[in-house]
Every structure is written in structure tokens, then in C-alpha cells.
Amino acid sequence: MMKPFLIFAFLLICTTSCKEKWNEEDKRAFFTACTEEAKGNWAHSDSLAKAYCDCIFNKLAVKYPQEEDMLEHIDKLAKDTDLINCRSEVAPGK
């Protein structure tokens, strides 16, 4: 389960730069990478993948309102139980 999340985190790093806030381009890049990762691994619908990515992004944005902050803590994301729990929140039993 953590391998897909680590791949997702890597994609997020690759698609972002060290700007201070989440801008629309970075949000789109996040949602594109997240949705593709979710649908490629366990989410069987666009709506389920979107709900999952919304959950993760909302929690990331609260913890790291500035992109730079999130990038500084990227190593912690794969172990962040709030983010890990998004999958069970949107798809119990998955």
C-alpha cells in the first residue's frame, strides 16, 4: 500500500517547484497524479479517485498551507496516518 503512495509523493515533488502557496497549476498536477495513481491501483471509478484525492489534498493543505513546507516534510507523508486513512474514509474495506 505504501509503494503507490511513495510513487505519488515522488510525482508530486517532480511537478511542483518551491513556491510559497499551492497555486492552481500545482493543484491540477497534484490531482492528475493522485487520480491516476488511485485508479491504477484500487479506485474503480473517477468519483472514488476524486474523493480520495480531495481527502488527501485537504489534509495536506491544512498541515502544509505552503508548498515549500510540504516539500520539506515529504519524507513524513508516507507515514502520515491522516493521509493513509483517506483511503478507508472514502472506500471502507479497501
Image: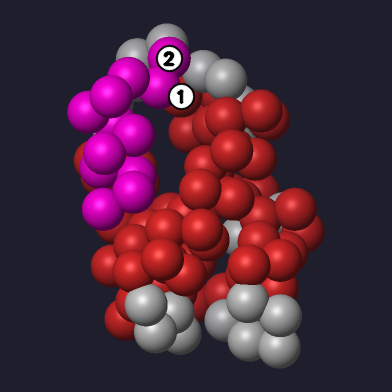
Image coordinates of residue 13 in percent, x first then y, are 34, 43
Q: Residue at x 66, y 28 (%)?
A: 62
Above or below for 80 versus 29? below
Residue at the image point whose x is 48% and y is 33% from the top:
71
Judge whether residue 71 can be spotted in this image.
yes
Label 1: which secondary element? helix
In the image, the segment drawn in magenta is 21-32
- Indicate which disc residue 67 carries: 1
* Residue 24 belongs to the span the image colors magenta: yes
Residue named by callout 2:
21
Which quarter of the figure is the N terminus placed in?
A: bottom right
Asked if residue 90 lies left or right of residue 20, the reply is right
Q: Is residue 39 left or right of residue 9?
A: left
Q: CA distance from mark 2 to mark 1?
A: 5 Å
- Quadrant of res 88: bottom right
Give me the residue at 28% from left, 67% from top: 36
**Pointer 2 with pointer 1, Cβ within 8 A:** yes
Q: Horizontal and vertical percent for residue 27? A: 34, 34
Quarter of the figure with residue 80: bottom right
Give amino acid for label 1: Glu
Q: Residue at x 75, y 53 (%)?
A: 82
